[in-house]
Image (cartoon, rainbow, N blue to C red):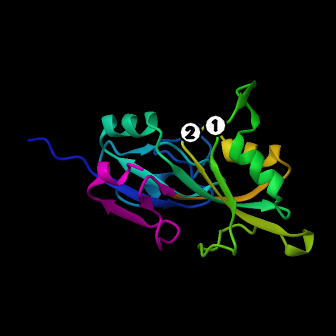
């Protein structure tokens, strides 16, 4: 008798790959180190090695495809180098040209605003940089697309390189008060992803 599919949310730590099998022989941290996931568990989308935060996992390949192919909002808290300006935020909101696989790409309009204070997030394992090197800003950016390293390219294109990137929401699923490396089983998975 087939078992029902299982779904999880995790707080992906900095320095982990969003996969279970290594692509090279080099020693890398993989998701399977965080929890004893059921067989056939897969990440829905990715967060790059240097990014942290909410990552969804499922044993349902059709659900994974459905989520990646829909315009589901993904919200990120982004620490950028410098005191971000209203002009830079406007450029982010209205779409900015970045390079994707060697070609120019105009990002879709998105939500972007400066956070009033530093968000309450777990401390990252690796230090960002010393405050003596100048101010930083925290920005919320919400996209319905997800090109490779898109947010990093967007903030760099407006003159404020990303120092730390943490995904905090996918659809209605929030990272809440999770700590780095936490794994939580989810129910009502499909309904929680609508926006």
The 10 Å Cα crowd at callout 2, few under 14, some 14 to 19, many 20 or more, is: some
Say whether residue 191 is magenta. Answer: yes
Marks 1 and 2, how far apart in space? 8 Å
Say whether residue 6 is left or right of residue 138. left
Magenta span of residues: 169-195
Please report the residue visible at 24 percent of the width from the left and 46 percent of the height from the top: 5
Please report the residue visible at 76 percent of the width from the left and 35 percent of the height from the top: 98
Q: In the rendered image, which residue does mark 1 sit on?
A: 108
- Asked whether the beta carbons under mark 1 and mark 2 sit within 8 Å of each other, the answer is yes
Please report the residue visible at 60 percent of the width from the left and 76 percent of the height from the top: 120
- Answer with the quarter of the image where residue 167 lies: bottom right
30 or 124, nearer to the observer:
124
Residue 40 appears at what percent x and percent y? Answer: 32, 42
Seen in the picture, residue 44 relative to 8 is either above or below; the reply is above
Seen in the picture, residue 41 relative to 166 is either above or below; the reply is above
* Disc number for residue 145: 2
- Answer with the quarter of the image where residue 182 lies: bottom left
Say whether residue 14 is left or right of residue 32. right
User: Please, what secondary structure does the residue beneath circle 2 have?
Assistant: loop
């Amino acid at each position: 008798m087939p078992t029902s599919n299982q779904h999880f949310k995790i707080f992906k730590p900095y320095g982990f790959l969003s996969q279970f099998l290594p692509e090279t022989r080099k020693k890398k941290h993989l998701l399977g180190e965080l929890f004893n996931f059921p067989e056939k568990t897969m990440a829905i989308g990715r967060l790059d090695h240097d990014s942290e935060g909410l990552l969804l996992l499922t044993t349902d390949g059709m659900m994974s495809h459905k989520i990646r192919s829909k315009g589901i909002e993904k919200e990120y808290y982004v620490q950028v180098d410098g005191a971000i300006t209203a002009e830079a935020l406007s450029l982010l909101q209205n779409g900015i040209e970045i390079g994707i696989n060697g070609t120019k790409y105009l990002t879709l309009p998105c939500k972007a605003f400066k956070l009033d204070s530093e968000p309450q997030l777990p401390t990252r394992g690796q230090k960002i940089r010393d405050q003596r090197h100048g101010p930083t800003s925290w920005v919320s950016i919400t996209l319905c697309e997800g090109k490779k390293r898109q947010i990093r390219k967007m903030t760099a294109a407006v003159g404020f390189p990303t120092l730390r990137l943490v995904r905090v929401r996918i659809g209605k699923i929030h990272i809440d008060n999770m700590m780095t490396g936490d794994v939580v089983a989810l129910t009502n998975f499909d309904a929680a992803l609508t926006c």
